Image: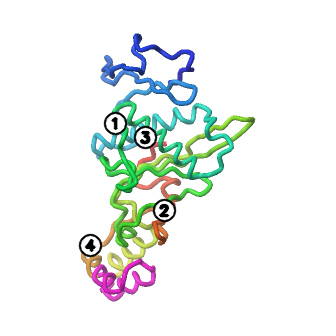
Amino acid sequence: MIRPRSAEPTAGDGGCFGSRTTTGTDGLASPRRVMMGDCIIVMRHIGPTSDSCRVGALSGSVKRIIEQAKVFAEAFASMPHPDLLGVTDGKAVGTYIELAFKKSLSDIGIIEATEGNAAKGIDLPSFNTDLKVTSLKQPQSSSPFASFKQKIEGLGYDLIVFVYVKNDTEGVCNVRFEAVRHVPARLTADFQTTKGLRRLIVDEGANVDDVFAFLVEKNIPADEASLYDYAEHLLKHPPEQGYLTISNALQWRLQYSRVVAGGIPGVLEIV
């Protein structure tokens, strides 16, 4: 629910300044009001998610982040964003949205205000989750390179991906989210590489030389001795199918077209 600033409650009537979160008769947390732009967003912890957003197998803490991502996306899209008017730098837009989402998590007590920093490499290290914000025009971003194995075994952490569409019309900037996805760590490997390895190992019964040759052909960024040892490992432990497109660079370049399209078992379609 969005309140105009003129309707902002005071601390005395249970507003956002100095107020406590209480539990109502419906068993849900009472609304928490937080400031965003010229509006007051009334947020609350939502109840059990619907079947369309299957979070039953996730930990309680990650569930709360996913639930808040849906609340945030709807609230953010419902108001203008004058600070983004005329901004064409996708990185600047992404940073703005990411910081606004982290503030919403902090305001309702899910994370500490200091959660995440560049040294740790991901935005929500306490939850082993990174945030990615990208435009629908080209849904991609970068990710720190830790090991060549990430392209095959996954990044090692979950992703929450916000895919936005920004429109500036008649002096007003509006942002809506075409998709918001939660991608578990086990599905964050490269699609084509894992598909090829699974075909070789699981379907065709390849030997270590076949797997090694495949890794070399795919330009996996490691020396040949390391790749041969890894080929032996993969024969015993075939990778799970990944659903990102990961390009080699000084940092991994991640593309999200498949997860945006939807319909992938295990990838939660939050929006």
Stretch in magenta: 206-231
Inter-mark Cα distance, 4 to 1: 36 Å
Amino acid type assigned to the residue bearing label 3 in the image: Lys
Amino acid type assigned to the residue bearing label 1 in the image: Ile
- Looking at the image, residue 228 lies above or below residue 74: below
Residue contact between numbered discs 2 and 3, judged by CB atoms under 8 Å: no
* Nearer to us: label 2 or label 1: 1
In the image, residue 8 lies at what x, y percent?
A: 51, 17
Of marks 2 and 1, which one's residue comes earlier in the chain? Answer: 1
Q: Which residue is mark 1?
A: 110
The residue sitting at 58% across, 40% down in the picture is 176
Between 135 and 241, the residue placed more toward the observer is: 135
Q: Which residue is mark 4?
A: 237
Q: Which residue is mark 2?
A: 254
Q: Which residue is mark 3?
A: 102
Disc 1 element? loop
Of marks 2 and 3, which one's residue comes earlier in the chain? Answer: 3
Between 235 and 185, the residue placed more toward the observer is: 185
Helix, strand or loop: magenta stretch: helix
Amino acid type assigned to the residue bearing label 2 in the image: Leu
- Looking at the image, residue 214 lies above or below residue 122: below
The residue sitting at 44% across, 61% down in the picture is 143
Inter-mark Cα distance, 4 to 3: 37 Å
- For residue 62, what is the image quadrant? top left
In the rendered image, is residue 83 in sight?
A: yes
The residue sitting at 60% across, 40% down in the picture is 175
In the rendered image, is residue 267 in sight?
A: no
In the image, residue 54 lies at what x, y percent?
A: 37, 44
* Nearer to us: label 4 or label 1: 1
